[in-house]
Image: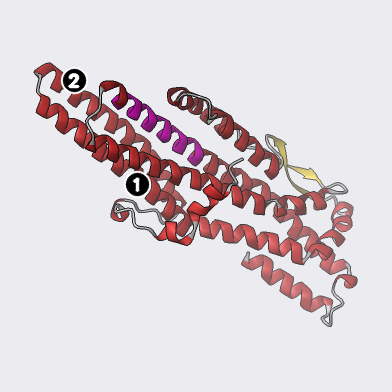
Amino acid sequence: MFLKEENTELLDADILAEETGVEDQVNIQDESDYVAYIQESEEAYGILNGAIMRAEHKAVMTEDTALMEAAIGDYWDSVVTFFKKVWEAVKQFFRNVWMRIEGLWMNRVKWVTKYSGVIAAGEAKLIEKKHAYSQVKTGEDSISKLVSGMQKIVGDAQGKNYAADVVASKIEAAKSAVRGEAPKMEKSPLTSGGVAKAVATVKELANAKSQIRAWASMEIKAAKEGISIAKKAKNKTEDDKTAAAWKTAIKRLRSEISLARLARSKTIAITNTLSGAAFSLCKSSASAGARSSKTAFKKGKSVKNEETTLSQFMDDE
């Protein structure tokens, strides 16, 4: 739904390199920094709106026009900074966090593709040994279903025919649906076809990766629009109706960013859980296949040498 050129192009090298002017106000080096930033961002938005409400009330009560204009100007300056920080946070997330996650995911895809034969060869041995592995007991059991489900929730909340204030309320409701429940895993005996399903799950990481980038693009696009609106609002004197429309648009954009961020984070977390369990089974099956099948390695190398290489690769991953 969001895998369109106008979204994915926002994450090219030029956009990620473009300066926001608030680089020193955002510091995201790892996952914990990003979680802390999200909490701070939500709190900052609440403080921002509380401050303007108090300032406007005081200005009205004292009939101080200069105070009102100053308060409004400060408010829109703060809105610009807020959206610049959103943009900067996405940039730093991709530079310092996502690249490591993406590298891990793509290494998993390359690994199961490279060793597909020996992985398949090990299934019978694992079944014979009554091998138990982690499977989804409740919750989404497919990365593709997870991604398409998230796409639908986000897309429905953003319906183009909705008024801005309606979109904001729909997005807030959609966030509850996105949060949902994390899949619960339990150990179950391996059955025929289980390894093939695990391989397919790992290969789905490529599609999940594309959607993660699309949601990040959605955040950047909304942040840029928010910056543009705030700058326009500060530099123009409009009637109350127009000013209210601008504030409603800002509320909608903030909600869009919050929903896209939540969908991105939830997708990464659940995808890691599902692909991690699947990849673990693939490694177990490959190990069993390498020990029991010489036919898997007939390209001038002994089974022993291939097993050593296989083991090193798994340890490195």
Q: Find the residue positioned furthest to the bottom.
A: 300
Answer left or right for 306 relative to 84: right
Residue 143 place in picture, x, y as percent:
68, 44
Q: Position of residue 211 (x, y in %)?
A: 59, 47
Residue 229 appears left or right of 188: left
Coordinates of residue 84 in the picture (x, y in percent): 34, 47
User: Which quadrant is home to the N terminus?
Assistant: top right
Residue extending farthest to the top is 61
Residue that mark 2 sits on:
57
Q: Label 1: which residue?
A: 85
Q: Which residues are magenta?
A: 243-261
- Judge the density around disc 1: few (<14), some (14-19), many (≥20) Cα neighbours within 10 Å: many
The structure residue drawn at horizontal position 53% and vertical position 30%, both measured from the top left corner, is 160
Residue at horizontal 60 percent and vertical 46 percent from the top = 3
Question: Is label 1 in a helix, a strand or a loop?
Answer: helix
Could you tell me the amino acid type at mark 1?
Lys
Residue occupying image coordinates x 38% and y 58%: 18
